[in-house]
Image: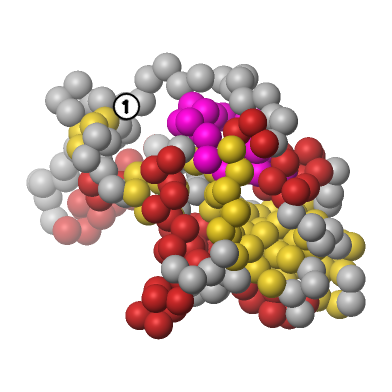
Amino acid sequence: MSKVIACYKWVADETDIKVNADSTLDISKAKGKISDYDRNAIEAAVQAAGALGGTAVALTFGTPKAKQSLKDALSRGPAEACYINAEEAARADGAVTAKALAAAVKKIENVSLVVCGEGASDTYARQTAPRIGAVLDWPVITSVSSVRFDGNALIAVRRLEDCMQTVKSELPAVIAVLPEMNSAPIPGLKAVLSAGKKPVTEFKAGDLGVDFAPKTTVSALKAYAMNRKSVIFSEGEIADKVKELTAALRKEGVL
């Protein structure tokens, strides 16, 4: 039976992140959650597995803290989960993450499709799917808004900046799905309770034969500050104010 892998990331809940006076971020009290976009990826994998007559498998790469994500992931429909438990995940860059996930995919038999979110809700780097495809030497389709299957082929619709593009690829393949791909449901009580009974496979860092040394490191993390011009049009008639506003927007290249 073929397997469809749903890759997801355990991230800090942005609602719990505090911004300090010097614009640095305090995430010490932030709770974890499955990346918002990856919830759509999990649902897409579950639907794809159903269409292919296979099973969906949730896969994550994280520190020991990410273990608490497994029940949530399994409650969303996958039949089983795989967890790469590595302290190195805390400082992993896109290359390391992709190598770790690809190594786990190789250990899971009969994989026909790997589904990722277009980007994680913390960094939105959009690197994971293309890099996994490069490591596995599988076709990669990004910005996917819908997908269907025709035998051993995948037909995906991509949303680009100025058009919609339909592409076809043989399986196995890797896809990165947009949030509009589906509406990720909130798991019900029955699904949450049954999630604890589903099988979980844990990989240690040494099990994968991967070099976890990152190529890039994060030197600082600061909140984004938007500098507003605060231009106020307060004098004259309304029609004059509208003209001034329109002229200002044209000057800025907005109109």
Image position of 190 with respect to 43: above or below: below
Taking depth in this image into account, of 195 and 94 the one nearest to the observer is 195
Instruction: Report x, y in % for residue 75.
Output: 46, 71
Taking depth in this image into account, of 91 and 208 the one nearest to the observer is 208
Q: Amino acid at mark 1?
A: Lys
Q: Quadrant of residue 215?
A: top right
| Residue at 25% in and 50% down | 15
| Residue at 85% in and 43% down | 137
- According to the picture, the residue beneath numbered tag 1 turns out to be 222
Residue that lies at the very extreme toward the top in this rendered image: 219
Q: Quadrant of residue 109?
A: bottom right
Instruction: Report x, y in % for residue 99.
Output: 69, 36
Most common SS among magenta residues: helix
- Does residue 103 belong to the magenta stretch? no
Image position of 227 with respect to 44: above or below: above
Taking depth in this image into account, of 239 and 200 the one nearest to the observer is 200
Q: Quadrant of residue 145?
A: bottom right
**Within 10 Å of the Cα at label 1, are there few (<14), some (14-19), or many (20+) other Cα atoms?**
few
Q: Is residue 204 visible?
A: yes
Residue that lies at the very extreme toward the left in this rendered image: 235
Q: Identify the magenta region.
A: 84-102
- Does residue 97 belong to the magenta stretch? yes
Instruction: Report x, y in % for residue 166.
Output: 79, 66
**Image label count:** 1
Instruction: Report x, y in % for residue 208.
Output: 69, 36
Secondary structure type for disc 1:
loop
